Amino acid sequence: MLTVHHLAVSQSERIVWLCEELDLSYELVRYERDAQTKLAPSEYKALHPLGTAPVITDGDTVLAESGAVVEYILARYGNGRLAPAPNDSEFADYLFWFHFSNGSVMPTKRLFNLASGAAAGAINSDVMDALTGRLDVTHHLIEERLGSVDYFAGNTFTAADIMNVFALTTMRVFIPFDLTDFPNIRAYLKRIGTRAAYQQAMKKGDLNRPPNLVQSEDGSFVPKANT
């Protein structure tokens, strides 16, 4: 059986959500983060040499990396769902946005976070300016895209949305991102929040922890359900 090993508050929520969207029969095994380090526990790290979430097992197959896991599940169990065919007009956009999150947004956010936490003077100001500029580009590119279409690939919900939502929601627990100036992103997240499969995945994966779809009225980034 397909087993999703889900680390709480992590990118593996994508895989739980994907399985719910596809209405698959799967086993969900949850792991809590270490109370002291906030990192994956040793039993999770032992699942795969990479030691990071997500990880799935499927028979003798053990697979990590979000993009690889999503593509594997779509190829094995998707039956053509959530991914346009190569001759579809949305195919090129789907490919770009599918890889955009982990190829551009997530690495930039991580580097920015590390640089922001470095000791004063340890990071060259030009480097910080470059990272800040890169983040601005990615956020405004998303805002522009979601102002012209309902979903990342076009007007159809696809796995490209599953790949991108984490960086706009749960990632804000670790790296705050003010949504005030991004009305298209806010409207998009509201649409996502109405999806039954997303709601079910969040309940199963993080035991009713409210998804971080919107920021609270006082500007804080405490997880809060969309209303």
Image (spheres, rainbow, N blue to C red):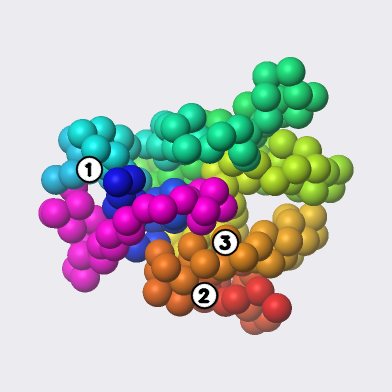
Give the alpha-carbon distance from disc 2 to disc 3, as whole Å: 12 Å
Residue at figure coordinates x 14%, y 45% from the top left? 46
The region drawn magenta spans 17-45
State the image coordinates of residue 190 (x, y, percent, origin top left): 72, 65
Q: Can you tell which quarter of the image residue 216 is in?
A: bottom right
Q: Nearer the viewer, residue 36 or 86?
A: 86
Q: Can you tell which quarter of the image residue 177 is in?
A: bottom right
Residue at figure coordinates x 68%, y 30% from the top left? 84
State the image coordinates of residue 219 (x, y, percent, origin top left): 63, 75
Q: Would residue 7 be seen by someone viewing this image from the given angle?
A: no
Q: Would you name the residue on which mark 2 appears?
A: 210
- Image-based side of 65 in relation to 87, left or right: left
Earlier sequence position, callout 1 versus callout 2: 1
- Image-based side of 7 in relation to 171, left or right: left
Mark 3 element type: helix
Which of the two discs, 1 and 3, sits closer to the camera? 3
Mark 2 element type: loop
Residue at figure coordinates x 44%, y 32% from the top left? 76
Asked whether 72 falls inside the magenta stretch, the response is no
Q: Would you name the residue on which mark 3 appears?
A: 198
Q: Residues within 10 Å of mark 1 (few under 14, many from 20)?
A: some
Q: Would you name the residue on which mark 1 appears?
A: 51
